[in-house]
DNA sequence: AAATGCTTCAACCGCTGTAGG
DNA sequence: TCCTACAGCGGTTGAAGCATT
């Protein structure tokens, strides 16, 4: 009757992943692809449940992940998509190749949501909030009115440009309250580099299992780190750049070595993905 | 320098839709 | 048709790092 249970949770490890675990999972998937998440931890020699492995792969280890701070343009697009789709993070994330739903959800909850509230917009409805509910909303978010007023001018200068095409009433409100503001300030955010060892191992493994031009790739990564303050994992754009004879416009570019096959696929609607198959 | 509060985000939890038996 | 497992999704949590006092 039915299928076998996914996993018994007894004896399974939880919490943060170690570099060794990451390496095991990555090696296994790169050599065998993904068929059944339930079997992966067993076959890869991991004391984790399949669900945990899946999450770790999707949110952190996937080669096409684009790391680093979301650009203003991306943030703008998230707000626009959220207004249309609501909290359907995976749908929203599908518009951002290399970004995960978890990442976008976190960014929304920690930054965009606050920014919208500072602008007097309800993050759920994207409509202007009434004064009373705004105060309540501030209270729940620990925003005191003084700091809000102080922040407001600064935030408004950043945000009114982003929001003007999304909510006309918001634009009107913002333009009114910052009409004397001549300068548009920008914020530069940086993130700390983490997991150096893993990334190093990853580079090493990629060199062994593919024909990547690592010098070229490392140069790209360094440039990326300088501009974003973040040490990214293997991003899609980088991976494309690694092939001097290929371009993002090509319909398919593949690397095949040792039984691992990664295929770069660009679909008709310009969505980009990596296809892990077998030879 | 230490204590405290705040922010971020990786990871977990629980639910839902789908499909296998 | 029912029961169950699975993959995927969104909400929530808590540890770690950073900022402030």
Image (tube, coloured by chain):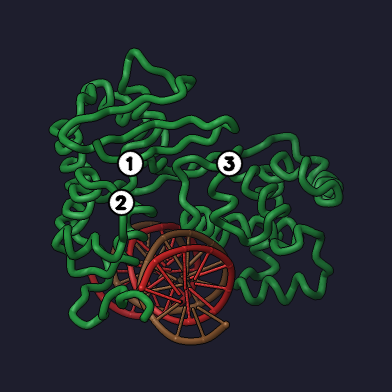
Chain colours: A green, B red, C brown
Residue A187 place in picture, x, y as percent: 55, 42
Residue matched to label 2 = A34
Instruction: State the SS at label 1.
Output: strand
Of label 2 and label 3, which has the lower sequence position?
A: 2
Does residue A190 appear to the left or right of A16 in the view shown?
right
- Judge left or right: residue C2 versus residue A163: left
Of the two numbered discs 2 and 1 on the same chain, state the one appearing first in sequence: 2
Q: Which is more toward the observer, A253 or A205?
A: A253
**Residue shown at 67%/49% (left/top)?**
A81
Q: Single out the mark in the foreground, 2 or 3.
A: 2
Chain containing the residue with disc 2: A
Q: Assess disc 3: are there few (<14), some (14-19) or many (≥20) residues with their C-alpha within 10 Å of its C-alpha.
A: some
Q: Chain of mark 3?
A: A
Residue drawn at 69 percent across, 61 percent down: A123
**Residue for point 81% across, 75% down:** A132
Helix, strand or loop at label 3? It is: helix
Which residue appears at 18% of the width and 47% of the height?
A27
Confirm or deny contact between disc 2 and disc 3 (CB under 8 A): no
Question: Splitting the image into 4 quarters, where does residue A144 fall?
Answer: bottom right
Nearer-the-camera pick, B14 or B1: B14
Per the image, the residue denoted by label 1 is A276
């Amino acid at each position: 009757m039915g299928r076998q249970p996914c996993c018994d949770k007894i004896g399974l490890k939880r919490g943060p992943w170690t570099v060794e675990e990451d390496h095991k999972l990555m090696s296994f998937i790169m050599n065998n692809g993904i068929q059944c998440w339930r079997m992966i931890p067993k076959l890869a020699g991991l004391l984790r449940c399949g669900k945990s492995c899946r999450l770790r792969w999707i949110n952190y280890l996937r080669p096409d992940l684009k790391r680093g701070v979301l650009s203003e343009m991306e943030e703008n697009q998230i707000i626009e998509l959220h207004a249309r789709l609501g909290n359907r993070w995976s749908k929203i994330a599908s518009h951002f190749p290399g970004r995960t739903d978890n990442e976008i959800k976190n960014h929304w909850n920690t930054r965009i949501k606050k920014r919208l509230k500072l602008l007097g917009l309800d993050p759920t409805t994207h409509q202007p909030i009434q004064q009373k509910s705004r105060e309540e909303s501030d209270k729940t978010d620990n925003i005191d009115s003084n700091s809000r007023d102080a922040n407001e001018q600064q935030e408004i200068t950043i945000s009114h440009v982003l929001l003007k095409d999304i909510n006309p009433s918001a634009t009107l409100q913002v333009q009114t309250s910052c009409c004397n503001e001549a300068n548009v300030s920008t914020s530069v955010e940086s993130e700390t580099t983490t997991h150096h060892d893993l990334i190093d191992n990853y580079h090493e493994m990629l060199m062994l299992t593919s024909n990547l031009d690592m010098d070229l790739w490392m140069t790209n990564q360094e440039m990326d780190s300088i501009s974003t303050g973040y040490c990214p994992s293997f991003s899609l754009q980088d991976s494309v750049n690694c092939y001097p004879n290929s371009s993002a416009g090509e319909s398919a570019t593949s690397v095949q070595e040792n039984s691992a096959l990664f295929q770069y696929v660009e679909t008709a609607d310009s969505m980009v993905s990596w296809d892990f198959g077998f030879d």
